[in-house]
Amino acid sequence: MLEKHGFSQTDDIADADLIILNTCSVRAKATDKVYSALGRIRRAKKESALLGIVGCVARESGADAFRRIPELNFVLGPQSYHKLPEIIKTPDTKLLNIDLGGLEKFDELPKMEKSPLVAYIPIQEGCNHCCTYCIVPYTRGRELSRPFDDVIKDTINAAKTGAIEICFLGQNVNGYKYTDENGKLYKLSDLIKEAAKLSEIQRIRFTSSYPTEMSDDLIEMFGVEPKLLPFLNMPIQSGSPNILKKMNRPDDLDAYKTIVQKLKQVRPDIQISSDFIVGFPGESDEDFEQTLNIAREIKYINSYSFKYSPRPHTAAALMPNQISEQIKSVRLQRLDLQLNENQREFNMACIGKEMVCLMEGTDKTGHNIVFRTPYMQQCIVEKPSVEITPLQKIKITDANKSCLRGEIIK
Ligand code: SAH
């Protein structure tokens, strides 16, 4: 969009004519980082340079952002990116747009002319689930699914312009539902089926999923579609039904485990990852032990763990029995020990296996190439003397907690 206005990318803040911070407000730390970065940038930038924030912190802060950082020229919420060129036309004004319009931005943003190897394709915006800790329903609004044909058009465009892997994106991605003019309903499984027909596309994945939206048609896809990677992020957040209830999350652990079993039945090599929150208001030692237990039992890999962070506009921020920072830190450490152990165990079990991996780039030394396995592990391979293609069959030769080593199989 900006290239059309004559812009190109620079790594040098002092040289930039336009500076955009794309922001996340899901935890307080992310929001704080935005304001400390803005403090640094406003001193480093040229006086004439336009400065702005886009995304969820913009939506959350609104006009207040201009008060905190007077140098800001624009504040655009996650559904107003397409309004950005307006500030180039009228640089002397302040541009504020934090509306939760809907899906207009997708019609207005220009098509990618060259895609990265991994193309992230938004299929749905917003979330109706209202987990009590989560700011997303406030920053991104109610759930909206993009028309099936539009998503497929973007997918074809990505495939024709260089993508090998497609990652379908949404705040509640497996809740994707679109009904066309004739009343025909399309689901995420339909998008996967259609994308898999494209010969250029070799790997398909999606994020982030809500457990009870894992419908049978979607589970089935893992059994019949080899391009769908055998790896699924399906956050449980906590192992305590008591805390899950307070989080307004699905609290039936047996139902969750049944979904995992069904997935393993159709795809025995599948691995599951999760997000976890420790120190949610009222979380007792016993509740936390249940989280450790479930992490051990499901043997989650590649997971994310966070200390609970009270967020504006959320119910949990007002709940009694908030947990101290100190307890949160200890619990996070203990959970990470378990998650690291799971990861190490899985990585070690990969030694000797052959996997088709996607090239990501060279490492810092320049002597190695970094690949991503089908489980999103990093795999480091010594740079071969001959030219190689982005997708390679690799034999895993070594592993530790954080990555794998391997050799390209000719
Ligand atoms: N479905 C969302 C999830 C984004 S947030 C989306 O894709 O937009 C990612 C993870 O952050 C959540 O799964 C949760 O584990 C964590 N998270 C969300 N709100 C949080 C809070 N208030 N404190 C700590 N962690 C939080």
Image (cartoon, helix red, strand yellow):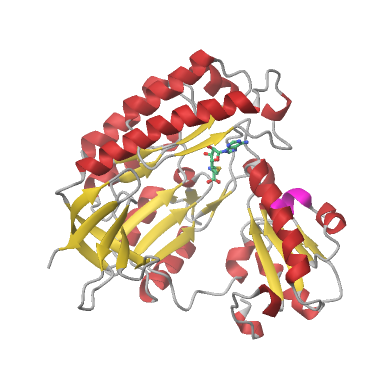
Q: Is residue 188 part of the magenta span, yes or no?
A: no
Q: Identify whether 131 is placed above or below 397.
A: above
Q: Residue furthest bottom?
A: 6
Please say if 242 is above or below 49. above
Q: Is residue 19 above or below residue 167?
A: below
Left or right of 318, for residue 92:
right
Q: Residue furthest left?
A: 410
Q: For residue 321, say whether it is visible.
A: yes
Q: Quadrant of the C terminus?
A: bottom left
Q: Quadrant of the N terminus?
A: bottom right
Tell me residue 252's x, y (percent): 44, 21
Image point (33%, 25%), residue name: 297
Task: From this view, report whether residue 214 is shown above or below residue 240.
Answer: below
Please tell me in which quadrant of the rendered image residue 83 appears: bottom right
**Toward the viewer: 289 or 171?**
289
Q: Is residue 251 left or right of residue 48?
A: left
Where does residue 248 sit, x and y in percent of width and height? 58, 26
Instruction: Kindly identify the residue that appears in the image at 18 percent across and 53 percent down.
Output: 397
Magenta segment boundaries in residue numbering: 57-61
Numbered label tally: 0
Q: Position of residue 69 (x, y in %)?
A: 82, 59
Q: Residue at x 37, y 20 (%)?
A: 254
